[in-house]
Image (spheres, grey):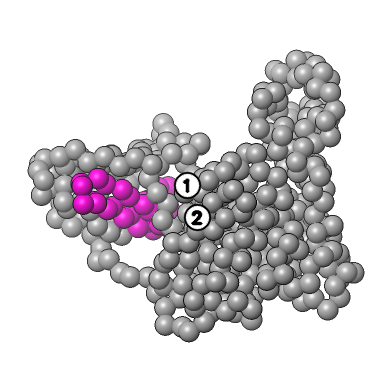
């Protein structure tokens, strides 16, 4: 999941060591903008050598434990930086007693306010253990969220989406499961966080074997029912889920959300056109954009010579829908060739465990209804006794969010998390 770059500058009282000490702790409150209120919890920690770290949670954003990349406290002034790739929000405010209030800006003309109150720390209804395991020469690291007070419980291993996902990306859903009696293993993708290796060079088989090794590792943990370990994958993770299950006989069920059920070159064309066609201003623009994207994907996924793509780029570089192709040394080209070989339905044909397929009806990155229909048909044809549930959530996008209001903050489709919990509880 990607997040906006956030820069918080919190101005506190007179500079002093005591003032610094009061920065640490939990703060509950909200951001408000354009009449919309977003509940947020901020956690600021200070270690034994005086170094600060911070995270934030938001149920509405479906995030938990999102780390700030930089935390600096100088006297009574605190700076927190969360790195992303879209916008910069700047919060400025101050503390009086146990309250923190101020204003923020994100872009010219876009302003809002925030208010926090110091909160008593509460312990979650689950324990957390650090785990490591290996796949070949790659060492992988994660966190197991284990419900409190149960002898043995079912468990879910979370798979990764595309890009450099750390364990934080699935922490919110994992904590929801652990709160409802289901253990959850979240982990750093190879080459991310505390895991070795390089996700940019990984093949689908590499990633599937990483996940299968995670399932095998989880079977060794006390408190886990080894007969009830399943996997949850979103987007790329959902697409690779059947390959993981085929390689691990210990997978007892699959939750595949926004999983591609078509050849991945077709999915790539679908995704790029949904991104670029809104900028086409004429029928000719639309036709040219389709031709350009088709050529880009032919080069990326099928190894066609690049000369015609570069020629089209030179001809249409000034069109409003245009985007430059990645540079020749960009990892996109190697990634695409690897995934061109992956045929989702071939792997779904081997699945013999219960499956939940869940999609957003307005997904613009994966063809939702067609993918669901193809996967469900493959399962019905090859494993007619396997229980398959399909849920397509009205109005929801690729990440199961509804269109945002004037504030720009998303709203999760109300049935998303309850659907997961109801299905898993069975």
Q: Residue at image x 64%, y 70%?
A: 230
Q: Residue at image x 55%, y 71%?
A: 220
Q: State the residue position of label 1.
A: 193
Residue 49 locus on image (x, y percent)? 20, 47
Residue 28 locus on image (x, y percent)? 31, 59
Q: How many marks?
A: 2
Q: Which numbered circle lies on residue 141?
A: 2
Magenta-highlighted residues:
31-58
Q: Residue at image x 74%, y 58%?
A: 243
- Secondary structure that dominates the magenta span: strand
> Along the horizontal axis of the image, is 403 left or right of 280?
left
Q: Residue at image x 48%, y 84%?
A: 151
Q: Quadrant of residue 30?
A: bottom left
Q: Residue furthest front?
A: 137
Dot 1 or dot 2: first in sequence order is: 2
Nearer-the-camera pick, 354 or 60:
354
Which of the two discs, 1 and 2, sits closer to the camera? 2
């Amino acid at each position: 999941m990607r997040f906006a770059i956030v820069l918080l500058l919190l101005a506190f009282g007179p500079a002093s060591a005591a003032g610094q000490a009061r920065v640490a702790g939990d703060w509950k409150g909200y951001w408000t903008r354009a009449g919309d209120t977003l509940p947020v919890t901020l956690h600021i920690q200070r270690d034994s050598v005086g170094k600060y770290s911070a995270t934030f949670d938001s149920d509405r954003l479906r995030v938990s434990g999102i780390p700030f990349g930089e935390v600096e406290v100088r006297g009574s002034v605190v700076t927190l930086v969360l790195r992303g790739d879209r916008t910069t929000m700047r919060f400025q405010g101050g503390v009086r007693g146990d309250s923190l209030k101020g204003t923020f800006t994100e872009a010219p003309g876009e302003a809002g306010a925030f208010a926090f109150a110091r909160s008593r720390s509460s312990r979650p209804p689950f324990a957390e253990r650090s785990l490591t395991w290996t796949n070949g020469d790659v060492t992988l690291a994660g966190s197991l969220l284990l419900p409190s007070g149960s002898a043995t419980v079912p468990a879910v291993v979370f798979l990764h989406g595309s890009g450099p996902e750390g364990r934080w990306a699935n922490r919110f859903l994992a904590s929801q499961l652990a709160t409802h009696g289901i253990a959850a293993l979240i982990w750093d993708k190879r080459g991310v966080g505390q895991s070795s290796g390089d996700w940019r060079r990984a093949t689908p088989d590499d990633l599937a074997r990483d996940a299968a090794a995670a399932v095998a590792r989880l079977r060794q943990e006390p408190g886990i029912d080894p007969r009830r370990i399943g996997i949850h994958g979103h987007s790329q993770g959902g697409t690779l889920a059947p390959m993981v299950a085929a390689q691990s006989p210990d997978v007892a069920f699959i939750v595949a959300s926004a999983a591609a059920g078509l050849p991945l070159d077709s999915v790539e064309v679908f995704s790029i056109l949904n991104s670029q066609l809104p900028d086409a201003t004429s029928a000719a623009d639309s036709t040219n954009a389709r031709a350009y994207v088709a050529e880009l994907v032919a080069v990326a996924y099928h190894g066609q010579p690049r000369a015609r793509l570069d020629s089209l780029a030179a001809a249409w570089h000034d069109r409003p829908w245009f985007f430059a192709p990645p540079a020749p040394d960009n990892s996109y080209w190697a990634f695409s060739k690897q995934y061109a070989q992956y045929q989702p339905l071939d792997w779904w044909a081997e699945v013999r465990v219960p499956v939940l397929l869940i999609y957003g009806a307005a997904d613009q990155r994966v063809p939702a209804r067609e993918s669901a229909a193809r996967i469900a048909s493959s399962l019905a044809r090859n494993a007619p006794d396997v229980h398959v549930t399909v849920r397509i959530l009205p109005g929801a996008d690729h990440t199961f969010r509804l269109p945002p209001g004037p504030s720009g903050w998303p709203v999760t489709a109300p049935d998303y998390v309850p659907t997961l919990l109801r299905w898993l509880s069975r």
